[in-house]
Image: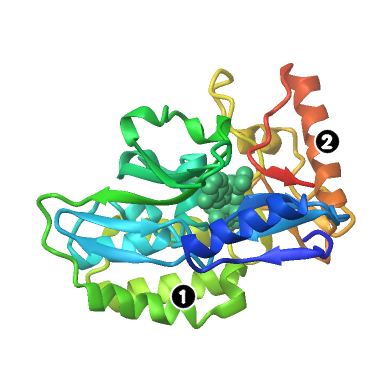
Amino acid sequence: MGGNAEYFASPQTVGELVELLRYCNQQHLEYTIFGIGSNVLFSDYPNANKMYISLKELLQFEVKENRWFVSAGIPMAMLALAGELIQSEDFQFTHLLPGSLGAGIYMNAKYYQGQIGDVISRVYYLDMAEPNLEVQCIPVEECQYGYKRSLFQDKPWIIVGADISVEGYPLLSQPEIESILERYMLMKDNKSNLMQFYTFFSGEMKRLTQPNTPTFIQEIEEYRAKNKHFVHHSCGSYFKNNYDIGKSIGALVDHLQMKGTGSGGAMISPHHGNMLINVNDATSEDIIHLQMVISEAIFKEYGFIPEPEVQIIK
Ligand SMILES: Cc1cc2nc3c(=O)[nH]c(=O)nc-3n(C[C@H](O)[C@H](O)[C@H](O)COP(=O)(O)OP(=O)(O)OC[C@H]3O[C@@H](n4cnc5c(N)ncnc54)[C@H](O)[C@@H]3O)c2cc1C
């Protein structure tokens, strides 16, 4: 969704990314960083003086002793597959969790009890305030993780990868994870397509685990299917939950009987009150209008304005 950008790039290495950022600086071009784009809303009228940089082609998965180095563009769902290969349950929560690891680190993506901040040990990043643009690193203890919060949201940093500790587990086979990655790369320009994402990761998981698919993996499949997460394009949960209220935003929208409300080509999902779906060539304006409608209704009934989780990129 959104308009066509004048400048778009998806570097494949950190070297290419650094070169691109230097180019932007020299040319006085603004830039914005994103991953697969599953949690952002692009403006219908993109900034013509801006480079839109997706890191979804930054794809590196290196098996080291007791740890994996995983680059920012690797889909989080790849961790669940890697976990199955070493018979670890620690990464199952990432099964069918859309988005890149870099964004997951930035947003502290979570599902049920699992969150990205709990499985990484060190994050590698570029500090845009430093002119030399050298890769730096920070241990997870200093990343200030909380519910959908991290230090990265307050810093001009670009996450390029992370270490994941797998101490005590068997060594992951590098050729095996690489062959999955090669199949993933065949998706080419469809890496941001939710339906293709589902088909790929659900299929790979079945291939690895059937007929003994772990219960939690089956539950994730059922939950995402029941809520029709991969039928229409969406940004997932639009608002962050407000835990002071004691009910999820989805439940509040449901209580207000707003599910199914439309605006242009967009609609509040009939299956999940916190999901705004693109049913018919929606514009970003359509989605933002629904955001306003929900915010107003929640404010009127519950006295607070819900905070969007989705980032609007101008
Ligand atoms: C159907 C559906 C279901 C979802 N379910 C869940 C869920 O269960 N739990 C959950 O937590 N989320 C969920 N999401 C949201 C989404 O999966 C996560 O927010 C994910 O982290 C977004 O990844 P992305 O690569 O698409 O990020 P993008 O949308 O591309 O970017 C999101 C933000 O991260 C920043 N960012 C991205 N990459 C980097 C980087 N390398 N360095 C610095 N900043 C960066 C961007 O600037 C932007 O602000 C769902 C989304 C969809 C569409």
In this view, the residue in front, 167 or 163, is 163
Colouring method of the image: rainbow
In screen coordinates, is 160 left or right of 206?
Answer: right
Residue 249 image offset from top left, x and y in percent: 63, 34
Report which residue position mark 1 lands on.
Answer: 200
State yes or no: Cβ of the residue under disc 1 lies below 8 Å from any atom of ligand 1.
no
Residue 154 occupies quadrant: top right
Residue 64 occupies quadrant: bottom left
Q: Check whether the beta carbons of the residues at disc 1 and disc 2 lie within 8 A of each other.
A: no
Q: Residues within 10 Å of mark 1 (few under 14, many from 20)?
A: some
Of the numbered discs 1 and 2, the one sitting upstream in the chain is: 1
**Residue drawn 49% across and 83% down?**
186
In this view, the residue in front, 96 or 261, is 96
Q: Residues within 10 Å of mark 2 (few under 14, many from 20)?
A: few
Does residue 268 appear in this view? no
Which residue type does callout 1 highlight? Answer: Phe
Which residue type does callout 2 highlight? Answer: Met
Does residue 152 appear in this view? yes
Q: Residue 292 bears which disc, if any?
A: 2
In this view, the residue in front, 302 or 281, is 281
In screen coordinates, is 115 left or right of 223?
Answer: left
Residue 12 image offset from top left, x and y in percent: 51, 69
Residue 189 image offset from top left, x and y in percent: 62, 76
- Tag 2's secondary structure? helix
